[in-house]
Structure formats: C-alpha cells, structure tokens
Image (cartoon, rainbow, N blue to C red):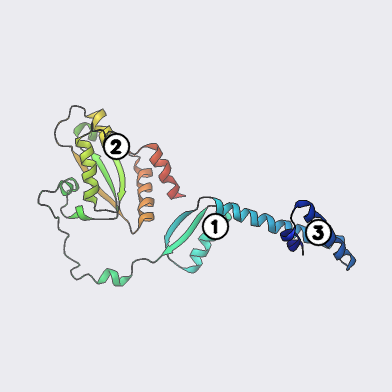
Amino acid sequence: MYQTAESVSSSATNRTHSERMIDELLLNNGYSSRVLEKIKKQRQERQRRKRKRLNTRSEKVTTLKLPFLSDKCTAQIKRAAESLNIPVRIVTTPGRKLRDLLTSSRPLDKPQCPSEDCRTCSALGDSGKCTDRNVVYSLKCNMMECRELDLGRYNGETYRPVGDRFTEHYRTAKNPTAESYKEKPFAKHYNVHHPQHTGEPELKLEIVARASNTMDRKIKEARAILANKPDLNDRDEQVELRKFLV
C-alpha cells in the first residue's frame, strides 16, 4: 500500500497525506504502532538499497574478462566485486580447448620470417618470431652507454605482429626530431641521450609474455612494467595500467 501511495501521489504533501491514511487504516485493523514502525523501516531500507544500485549502475562500468573456471568461482568473484562496490562487469570466456592445440597439420614447423633481411628478427635474435601476435614485449636501447647505465628501456603490448610494432618504434628512434614522433618514447630518448647519432638505431627486442586476449595482455604488461620499472614508460601510462592489477 505504501508503494502504491508513493507511485500515484503527485506531490510530497499528497504522499504524506496518503501514508497517514494508510497508518490509520492499519491501526484500525488491529496492527500495533510497533508493527507500523517495522514496516516503515523495512521500506526505507529497500529504498536505500535501490538508490545504491542505481548509483552504482550510473558509474562508468569496466568489463573484466576472465577465463572460465567454474560457476562457483565466477559467482564468488562477482560477490566480491559487489561487496567492495567495484564498478566492474565480470565476463567469462572459454579457454583454448585441447582440440585447438592438437589439430595443427604441421605442429613442429618453425615459423618463417617473410623477409630475408628483417630488422625485427635481428633485434629479437631469433628468425621467424617477428610474426608473433598477442604478445607483451621489452624493447631496449642497445647503445653502449645505455647498456652500462641501464637506460632506454620500454615495455609494451600488441595484438598485431610484433614486427609491425617494432617497426613503429624503430622509425621514431631513427627520426627523433620529426614533428609526429617527438613525443614518442624512443624519439625522446634519442633526442636526449643520442642527439648526435646519425646511424641506424640500435634496439634490442624481447618477447616477455604471450596472451590470449586484450585483458590478459594488459594485465601482463602492467605486471612487467611494475616489476621492471622501465624508464621510457611515462608515469601517466603506469598509473593507467595499475588499474588492471586491482
């Protein structure tokens, strides 16, 4: 009855008048004032929870993709997120099936590099891996002074072939004064530490982790940055990535 009175009342005054009429009706039908107070408290608590849910939904919700383990595990994660008021939507994805791992027609074949003189393979020290996708990588300046001072280190991630991403870094290091490159990590590094360098950039590339999806890459990249503290990953980027480790 209280809910109906609230929904049909056109103003707060009318709602208060309707609630008083309901109070009198219940008292006349044998309900005690203590029961009325209990009903009102329960109603206020339901309204508070409803407002809380609406406020939570209005916040920006982040989707968190996790590999499916079990219904029980997924339910526990969702309950934990709700109890901590974390605005996150949990989505589970199926992992790789054994069938997917065993159906390659030539599983022992080594990947082939599409180029005879591949900069990425030279930087990796391993021919063929330049086509690897969905990876987290470490890229270092290989100039002698940077090796001695442990400078010029960067961690990144890419869904594309790692060779494509390396080529982009290589171009910024080779043309550090170009207007479109000057804010890039390796352009800044070469402008500050190697302003007189005119030859080819000396970069060393390493694949440090492989991932199954975007969220997995972001988490592994954040862990790598947190562990290695590379000097070329700026602070804003590090703060942004830390949210993937919550």
From the image, tell me which residue sits under label 2.
185
Amino acid type of the residue tagged 3 in the rendering: Ser
Amino acid type of the residue tagged 2 in the rendering: Pro
Q: Is residue 56 visible?
A: yes
Residue 24: where, in percent of width, then height? 87, 62
The crowd level at tag 2 (other Cα within 10 Å; few <14, some 14-19, many 20+) is many
Amino acid type of the residue tagged 1 in the rendering: Ala
Spatial CA span between label 3 and label 2: 67 Å
Depth check: 26 or 12 in front?
12
Which is nearer the N-term, disc 3 or disc 2?
A: 3
Q: Nearer the viewer, mark 1 or mark 2?
A: 2
**Residue at left 77%, top 65%?**
1
Q: Residue furthest left?
A: 116
**Residue at left 17%, top 51%?**
126
Q: Nearer the viewer, mark 3 or mark 2?
A: 3
Report which quarter residue 171 is drawn in: top left
The crowd level at tag 3 (other Cα within 10 Å; few <14, some 14-19, many 20+) is some
User: Relative to residue 218, is residue 44 drawn left or right?
Assistant: right
**Residue at left 20%, top 67%?**
107
From the image, tell me which residue sits under label 3.
18
Depth check: 12 or 113 in front?
12
Which element carries disc 3, helix, strand or loop? Answer: helix
Q: Nearer the viewer, mark 1 or mark 3?
A: 3
Depth check: 142 or 104 in front?
104
Spatial CA span between label 1 and label 2: 38 Å
Which element carries disc 2, helix, strand or loop? Answer: helix
Residue 155: where, in percent of width, then height? 31, 44
The answer to whether marks 1 and 2 mark residues whose Cβ atoms lie closer than 8 Å is: no
From the image, tell me which residue sits under label 1.
80
Which element carries disc 1, helix, strand or loop? Answer: helix
Report which quarter residue 159 is drawn in: bottom left
